[in-house]
Each structure stands twice: as structure tokens, then as C-alpha cells.
Amino acid sequence: MTDNDKTILVLGATGKTGRRVVNGLRGRGATIRAASRSGEVRFDWDDRNTWEPAFTGADAAYIVDMQDKPGSWDAEGQVRELAKQAVDQGVRRLVLLQARVLDKVGGKSLIAGERAVQESGAEWTVLRPNWFAQNFDEGVLLDGVVSGELALPAGHGREPFVDAADVAAVATAALLDEGHAGQVYELSGPRAITIEDAVRDISRATGRTIRYRPVTHQAYVDELVSYEVPQDYALFVADLVAQIRDNRNATPTDTVQRVLGRAPRDFSDFVKAAAATGVWNV
Ligand SMILES: NC(=O)c1ccc[n+]([C@@H]2O[C@H](COP(=O)([O-])OP(=O)(O)OC[C@H]3O[C@@H](n4cnc5c(N)ncnc54)[C@H](OP(=O)(O)O)[C@@H]3O)[C@@H](O)[C@H]2O)c1
């Protein structure tokens, strides 16, 4: 089967990695079903009626689950049901996005869905990335950068931020190429940096002064809650940031190099490209 004959369902297709997976697969000539609540193909984890139509005709699927959803979401159970639906409809390959976070955060396991795809009967690959660089320009850190101050409970810990494009490139390879079945890929950028390093880089690239102010875990939770973020979600995000503070996943991996045959993108190169879009201008 050539890439042109393959149909791939991409969940989270409007998100940081999903969007890039769609582009990568299109570049290889595969037929894409780009799915999310607002995607070309409607898929909603909370609406079972959308699952079967989404998988129709798909040979493989990229699964982005809802592990950061506030409240009690049964990640393993939901991924298990989804994987069964996929296999029942003839999907042969599943690539699951999880996270390089082995501790529970906000009471949740971010690798809870892994067992479900591993036991699904499909060929499977699991991706466990570090924090994405794109949190600074598309995600949870954007508002702070634009305001000129990032106040986070990250202490002076280090994180090898990974570019979402590298995660997507590995996902694309796992969806289309052979040799990735049965692999759990831990994906990082090439070097671990502090939040101070990150804002220094962004300041240099934008010509603005962006500061980092370390705050306590509790102060951060309280601040998020004051902006009407639900308490459980605030705790989840604070625990995730604390992973940086504690250097929990600070050691870079060589997985991007091994899988793609090239180095992962450096944070500075991400910053130069993001600054050029004007996203951090006031
Ligand atoms: N951000 C990071 O640094 C990072 C690092 C490691 C792992 N991860 C993992 O990556 C995953 C995505 O995180 P992200 O930050 O990349 O998020 P994101 O960019 O906001 O993407 C989330 C995607 O999920 C879709 N979505 C949201 N609610 C949905 C629902 N109820 N049903 C179906 N689709 C839904 C969204 O599209 P619609 O709104 O159109 O539905 C969007 O396409 C999470 O599992 C996260 O833990 C993230």
C-alpha cells in the first residue's frame, strides 16, 4: 500500500500537533480525515454518535485524548472504548499522543491511555513528549509573554521543550512508515532550559522586556482561580509546571534524531520563527 492509498483519521486536528500532523500527512499524499469538535470531520469525545462516522474508511488514526480536561475523565476507559471502535471498523494502526510525565498531575495520570491502545489488537505507537515550545506562542504561556511577565511555579528548573512540529513529524512517520509499531517514544528538544532562559530568548528576538517571576504552587493556583479557572484545572496546570521546577523530565532524549534522522529543532530557532509572526507584539 502506498501513502496515496492510505486514509488517516487525525483527532485533535485543529490543535498544536494535530494541525501539523494533517500537514505532514497531506505532504506525503495520504487522504486525511481531520477531526475535532470544530474540524472538517466532527469528532467529540463527549458525543459517542460522532465516533463511528469519524473512523469510516480509516486505515490508521492519530489519537489526541482529553487528558487535560477538568473534572473526572476516565482516560484509560475512554481510549479503550475508542480503540475498540477503531479496531471493529478495520483500523489497523493507532498512534497515541500522551506526555512525558510519569507522576500524577492534578490527580491524573497522563499515560493512562497507553495500556488501552497496547491491548487493542491494532499496531500501536505511543508518543510521550515534553512540554511543547508552542505553549509560549499558541498555548497556556502566551498571555503571560504578551503581558511582559510570566509568573509560574517553575523555580529554576529545566525543561527540554520540544517543538510540536517534531512531535508531528514523528507521528506522521509512525502513521505511514514501518518500524514504529510497539514503540513508546519519549520526545524532547535538544537542550533543557529554564523559564528564565526562555524569556531571555524571547526578549532578545522581540526587542521587548519579558520577565520571569517564580511564584509558589499555591499562589499560582489562587491566581488561576481568581481568573475563574476551575480549581481542579488550576491544580492540574500548576502540577504540570511543578514538573519543570523539579527537573522531572529534564534529560533530553535522542528519539527525534533516531526516528527522523535529524536533530530536533532548538528552542532558539522556534523563538526566531514565532517572533517573526508578530504573535508576541503588543
Ligand atoms: N501542550 C503541551 O505542552 C503538551 C505536552 C505533552 C503532551 N501534551 C498532550 O497533548 C494533548 C493536546 O494538548 P495541546 O496542548 O496540544 O492541546 P491543543 O493544541 O489545544 O489541542 C487540543 C485539540 O483537541 C480538540 N478537542 C478539544 N476538546 C475536544 C473534545 N471534547 N472532543 C474532541 N476533540 C477535542 C481541539 O479541537 P476542537 O476545539 O476543535 O475540538 C484541539 O484540536 C493533550 O493530551 C496534552 O496532555 C501536551
Image: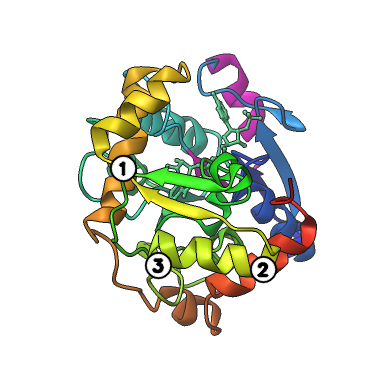
Point out the tag, 3 or 2, that comes first from the N-terminus. 3
Residue 59 magenta-highlighted: yes
Closer to the eye: label 3 or 2 = 2
Q: Secondary structure under badge 1?
A: loop
- Residue at 60% from the left image edge and 63% from the top image edge: 203
- Residue at 54% from the left image edge and 75% from the top image edge: 266
Say few, some or many: other residues with alpha carbon within 10 Å of mark 3 (under 14 / 14 to 19 / 20 or more): many
What's the CA distance linking mark 1 and mark 2? 25 Å
Say few, some or many: other residues with alpha carbon within 10 Å of mark 2 (under 14 / 14 to 19 / 20 or more): some
Q: Position of residue 48 (x, y in %)?
A: 53, 17
Point out the tag, 1 or 3, that comes first from the N-terminus. 3
Is the residue at mark 3 in contact range of ligand 1, meaning its CB lies under 8 Å from it?
no
Mark 1 residue type = Val
Residue beneath disc 3: 160
Q: Position of residue 18 (x, y in %)?
A: 62, 47
Residue 143 relative to residue 215: left or right: right
State the mark number for residue 80: none
The quadrant where residue 43 appears: top right
Residue 266 relative to residue 115: left or right: right
Point out the tag, 1 or 2, that comes first from the N-terminus. 2
What's the CA distance linking mark 3 and mark 2? 19 Å
Mark 3 residue type = Pro
- Residue at 72% from the left image edge and 41% from the top image edge: 33
Residue beneath disc 2: 205
Residue beneath disc 1: 215
Q: Quadrant of the C terminus?
A: top right
Q: Is residue 169 visible?
A: no
Numbered range of the magenta stretch: 48-64
- Is 150 in front, or is 255? 150
